[in-house]
Image (spheres, rainbow, N blue to C red):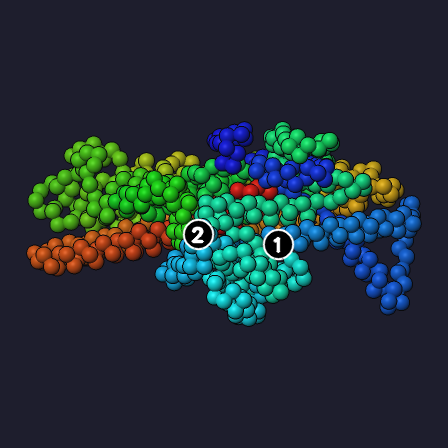
Amino acid sequence: MSRGGGGGGGCCPSMDLMRSEAMQLVQVIIPAESAHLAVSYLGDLGLLQFKDIKRCGEMARKLRFFKEQMSKASISATSTQFSGSSLEIDDLEVKLGELEVELTEVNANNEKLQRTYNELVEYNVVLQKLNEVQQNNRGKCQQISLAILLWREMVTDPSKQVKLGSLSGLVPKEKAMAFERILFRATRGNMFLRQEPVDEAVTDPQSGEKASKNAFVIFYSGERAKSKIVKICDAFGANRYPFPDDLGKQLQTIQEVKKEKAIYHTLNMLSLDVTKKCLVAEGWSPVFATSQIQDALQRATVDSKSQVGSIFQVLNTQEPPPTFFQTNKFSSAFQEIVDAYGIAKYQEANPGVFTIVTFPFLFAVMFGDWGHGICILLATLYLIIREKKLASQKLDDIMDMMFGGRYVILMMSLFSIYTGLIYNEFFSVPFELFGKSAYACRDPSCGDATTEGLIKVRPTYPFGVDPVWHGSRSELPFLNSLKMKLSILLGVAQMNLGIVMSYFNARFFRNALNFIPQLIFLNSLFGYLSLLIIIKWCTGSKADLYHVMIYMFLSPTDDLGENQLFPGQKLVQLVLLLLALVSVPWMLIPKPLLLKKQHEQRHQGQQYTMLQATDESVTELEEHHADSHDHEEFEFSEVFVHQLIHTIEFVLGAVSNTASYLRLWALSLAHSELSSVFYEKVLVLSWGYNNIVILIIGAIIFLFATIGVLLVMETLSAFLHALRLHWVEFQNKFYEGDGYKFAPFAFASIIEEED
């Protein structure tokens, strides 16, 4: 299943959703003069996830802190004995000294960047608050105040052109009242001031401390008033920021401020090289984005007129890469359903591929009514048709959730119409859509809602349930049996799919396989039950499948009698029972032994070695330390216990998970019966009174009951049950979900999140 990249705008190659994009750890060395522009272009591109490589400096600071504290406490460090070559203390001191110098430089640079960042944060707050004021307060008071200012200026000198000025910024909340009084006295009332409290405390760029502030805007007339206001602002420690009058310019300025904040925040994650003329960045990027990132760096070099170009190189690492799936507006909601359970491990088989079909289908099995499906479809089409307008609006939580999952709901409604046609239910009413019923009354006496007098007079009803079953005495037993058996068939099929996916995962990661014994165990019991269901449907046998499955375990050698469905069934059951018993130790014993053998082969002939060189970076020291964990001794008992738990969990889960799929039958039956009760006990009953008032009341009650209970509560219930079946019964067969998501530096996502 190929798709275009949702975030790439056509620039990214098409790929399938089965496995995530191939990722690479890259290092970018950027000249200082082009760093700002390079980060800006990379933010527009949105395909590079920066790493905070200054954590090494933080580690050095902690080491110095520990050393100082130990010196103050007169505690001497104990020497550690190493096998092999000894660790040179002088080399270690040199390394820590280099880190200390680097940290000092970083702190000096960080102070400047932090001040700029705090100013941008305050500017963003001012723009947002004053934009709200401008949008929500266009009343008469503001107009009158501004009109008074204009009148006073015209009276002072009518020949001069009337022109108002404005100042905006943030003032400490505790000084706000005094600030307003002084302004009024100094300008003699020739100004208009509006203040708006800021919800959260902001960090002051000058003091570096958090403080509660008010956003303000001052309208004045004349340069003398401006100079007085500026002096008062400085005296009260009010930070001033420009606020554009035009709404379009305001929105553009807000976006530019957000971009600048993001750029400075990213620049603060980079580190200076030894020459102090270049910034070094590390991060993850998709392999296909290499040329695009290099093009962005080249454009930054040209546009900044730098004499030195940026260097882009791929690093070798053992660190697990982030997971990145290219999704579009259709597939993204289904992927979010999977991600809510856990982010896929790097290049792990993705359940999202199957979720696109299986999730709405299992929902529809529980919500099978093509009348209700059409209602949901119409509501979803409204969201899809107006998606451009709705995407630009701020929606409430429930509406935003529905809009985000509009394509999931679309698929759910289409599958509900399909299963509703199979169940032959339109608001619980059956229709002969695909031809006449196959049955008819033998004589007039059979017309009392019973099937005893029916005879087959036509070919089998071509699609779905024959409408004659609805309203008959046999309706409930028939639909009960049908939906229960369908639930088991669908559950066993989906669990088998999960086990097959575990095979592809194990093969891809070259792990030990448990695929064959798991498949044998599941199908020896519940695969066999599914086969019996199909044989019973095809042959019309009256065999009791409960009896067959129970006595398959209790008395496997007894005669089946009237419960025999095919010749040799007894022998087949004995063989399947034996296979199920053999598969349990097969799951338990071979895998720990195989893992032990692989561990011995992997580390055969390898010895512990110390890192000798002193010129490597702290990152290399960390990598060496991480690699040393691979040489740890293999704990066979721990692996065996883990495998024992996994085996018990699978054996018990095979039974409980199969039983869990019976919720498909239970909810489908509940939905059908509720719909039937609302139709017969409300709408039909009110129609029988031959009273227009009672009919209108009955129709209103039916409408609200259908919308409130069936289209809202039942939809939510079926959605949650389908979610559980995917997360627990399906995904736990193969999906680990212990990865982390690719979060590139992208202006589009940053602006969207803050909005």
Q: Position of residue 325 (x, y in %)?
A: 54, 38
Contact between labelled residues 1 and 2, with CB atoms less than 8 Å apart: no
- How far apart marks 2 and 1 lie (CA) works out to 40 Å
| Residue at numbered disc 1 | 119
How many residues crowd mark 2 within 10 Å: few (<14), some (14–19), many (20+)?
few
> Is residue 396 placed above or below 349 in the rendered structure?
below
The residue shown at (56%, 48%) is 258
* Observer able to see residue 552: no
Q: Quadrant of residue 422?
A: top left
> In the picture provided, is 559 more to the left or to the right than 473?
right
Q: Which residue is mark 2?
A: 159
In-front residue for pair 52/344: 52
Question: Disc 1 residue type?
Answer: Glu
- For the residue pair 221 and 37, the one nearer the viewer reads as 221
* Relative to 418, residue 679 above or below: below
Which picture quadrant has residue 502?
top right
- Please report the residue visible at 84 percent of the width from the left and 62 percent of the height from the top: 68
Q: Is residue 86 visible?
A: yes
